[in-house]
Image (cartoon, coloured by chain):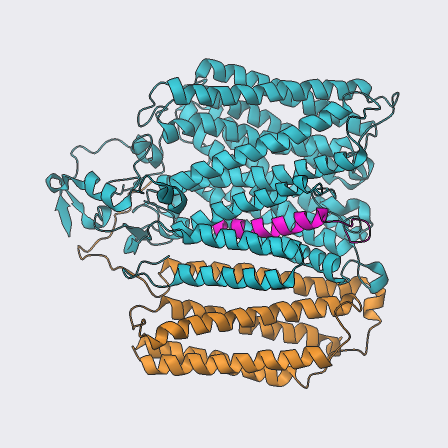
Amino acid sequence: MTDAAIQYSGAPLPEVTTGTRATGWWGMVWLCVTEAMLFACLIASYFFLRGSVQAFAAEGGHYPSLTLPIPMTVLLVTSSGTMWWGERGIRRGDQRRLRIGLALTFVLGAVFLVLQGIEFSHGLHGPTASAYESIFYTTTGLHGAHVAMGLLMNLYAQLQAWRGHFSAKRHLTVQNVSLYWHFVDAVWIVILTTLYLSPRLW
Amino acid sequence: MTIARGNLAGLAERLDAQWSTPHSIYGWFATVDHKKIGIRYLITAFVFLLLGGTEAALMRAQLARPDGHIFSPEVYDQLFTMHGTTMIFWYASPMLSGFGNYLVPLLIGSRDMAFPRLNAFSYWSFVLSGVFVYVSFLAGAAPHGGWFAYVPYTDATYSPGLNMDFYALALLFLTISTTVGAINFVVTIFTMRAPGMSLSRMPLMMWSTLTTSVASIFALPSLTAALIFLELERRVGFRFFDATGGGTPLLWQHLFWVFGHPWVYIIVLPATGMASMMFPTFCRRPIVGHTYIALATVSTGLFGFGVWAHHMFATGMPLLSTTFFSAASMAVSVPSGMQVFAWLATIWAAKRHVYSTTFLFLLGFLLLFVIGGVSGVMTASVPYDWQVTDTYFVVAHLHYVLVGINLFPVIAAFYYWLPKMTGRLLNERLGRWNFWVMFLGANLTFFPMHFAGVRGMPRRIYTYPAGMGWDWLNMLETIGAAVFVVGILLFIINVIWSLRAGAPAGDNPWGASSLEWSTTSPPPEYNFDVIPVVRSREPLWDAPSPSPEASIPDYRVLDTGRRTLGTTVLDGQPQEVLRMPGDSLWPLAIALALAAMFTAVLLASVVAIVITGILVLACAGGWLWPQPEGAAS
């Protein structure tokens, strides 16, 4: 083995609490990975049922309406934007932008959940009607639960933001809440594509 | 900035003041020391081994002779289900997590894990989920659907009662514990290695821990999904698995085994990693093929995700899938074979063999691994699998694999690392007896099962009529089981003897090469007073430098506050200083709140679920609320 020298300038090493070198950020990345696998399993179950069960395929022309999911998608994508805008703010130490960004994101996410509630109460048969409804409600419901969790995390971050806990150098909570929120939004895009759009394509 | 060596006086006292946990009831519950947590994991997992072993012994008592009727079929079902569930989930994996928790920071030259509080939470939720599943015996409703819980046997129609709800909820609870534990290992290994420990110099046990942790993060969600489906189907009437409602029972099998087969590697790879640490010590030379073993470990973990359906050859899958999974399963023997040959070459090329008890257990492990591997290749062949599926041949195979590649290295690891943990050696004479009795017992128990299987004895039958040609085989197996129990008892006696009268171990009793042997036995709470520097794969075997360093950079000292060093992922270059959190009761609180929530779900009380759910969130909020010092958790 060659003796690769250890590089050290002599200056004290930084105490990093924010950014992609913080251990807390790594933890959130792996949490998102394992959650992504959970949704991958749900999506795979959907296609497995759709591909292997005759009765499931025969539900044919019975795909979910797009009237609500399209505005819901717009809401979530916009909320990712407001979250990003707020996080960019605190990176420069802008407390006000962070607070506004978090609050806007919260409102958009909450409206998404309300629309999902309306969809659930008006849409299909109940989740116990057949395997199709079971997997549909479980996947969208679990995603809704993740949105709700994202909103709680958002509230928690706001509570600290309004007390001025964050600064340009120290805002790991914001960073993690934001990462989780973007992840939940990305999952929604996958759900939209599979559960809502794919039955119309093949 | 550097500190002159002469100015390090009083360093140990300063670090001790920062890192030590008060000796009080509070300290006992609040500690986040990875070594204490690791030892707790080891003890708890060993208790589960004894529980699962007791269940096995009871089954062997029933099967000793034909027409045995000590237990009713209902009780026997609970025994085999709890035996499998306990051993797979609450013994095999947590035992390795215990060694991992204790050893990872020591092996990489760090002062703790990346998330010490998460580590404590991981332990508390592991032990509480185990209590949760064992309470089912008191309720007279222990799980009874087999450890892989196939529907429709386990749906509400064929399995009314709380039995399978205990199973599903306890496993969901345990999944949380295992996932956060795995994330903790990955982040620790990626960011906290000693300066100079590039990936290529990382000890092999770190490669196996990293592989299994990543595999857990990817595999466990599939089990989570399956269990959520099962509970929704049983409790609320969803119809994922109900053929009359457009579902299919095969969905359960796929989801379970997409998790289940990677899990098999998750519970053996860390043990092979430990073996790769121990072999060089007793052969007095570096391991042969370090890089190849690392590659084989990672590729076994990857292959593990592509072989799940070999558990389902008898379900009538399309020919193409069957062929693919058969070929993939056989391909696993390539990386496994690479590891075996690397160990054999290490033994072959040894400078000197040290026939300690550890080494004997490792040799036993090699032999059992090969036998289990060969029967694995046999069952990977589809026509043969059709012949022996659900017979004792499969039971023989899986026990050779799990006893051989998990239990034997684990006992070897106890003989090897317990002196580090307690500061006292085990008795070598008793150790030899321990090995030979266990080795004889294991083979006597499990080898005849191959023949019983080929002769058509189905697994999981609670009794059998005389004259099937299985009588003497079963008697032999039961005698073997009794011998095996004696072997385990000898081990327990040895541990107790060692704690009372064992010879002092010293820092490095085996003359080993890895960093954990450079600190005291047992190590101080901060592990290393000066964080070590690594210049090769065998740091303690390096020639000592002609003159000790006159001055030490301050990032290796860090004696103000609980702090340790963060390094770069690939090269292990010093990068940042990490502030570590102190003792806390929140991990225990949130684990208790989760236990309450799972109990509420078990009892299907909506009010209780809401209240306990809020409690869980409140605990999480309290845990994460910023500390005045700004300590990260």
Measuring from the top left, give residue B348's x and y in whole percent: 48, 23
Q: Is residue B180 magenta?
A: yes
**Image quadrant where residue B234 sits:** bottom right
Q: Is B600 colored magenta in this rendering?
A: no
Q: Nearer the viewer, residue B365 or B101?
A: B101
Count of numbered marks: 0
Q: Which chain is orange?
A: A
Q: Position of residue B41 (x, y in %)?
A: 48, 39
Whether residue B158 is situated above or below residue A30 in the rendered picture? above
- The quarter of the picture where residue B26 lies is top left
- Image quadrant holding the C terminus of chain A, namely bottom right
- Predominant SS of the magenta segment: helix
Residue B59 left/right relative to B43: right
* Magenta residues (range): B155-182
Displayed quadrant of residue B365: top right
B211 vs A21, left or right, is: right
The chain that appears cyan in the image is B
- Is residue B204 visible in the rendered image? The answer is no
Q: Residue at x 47, y 80 (%)?
A: A105
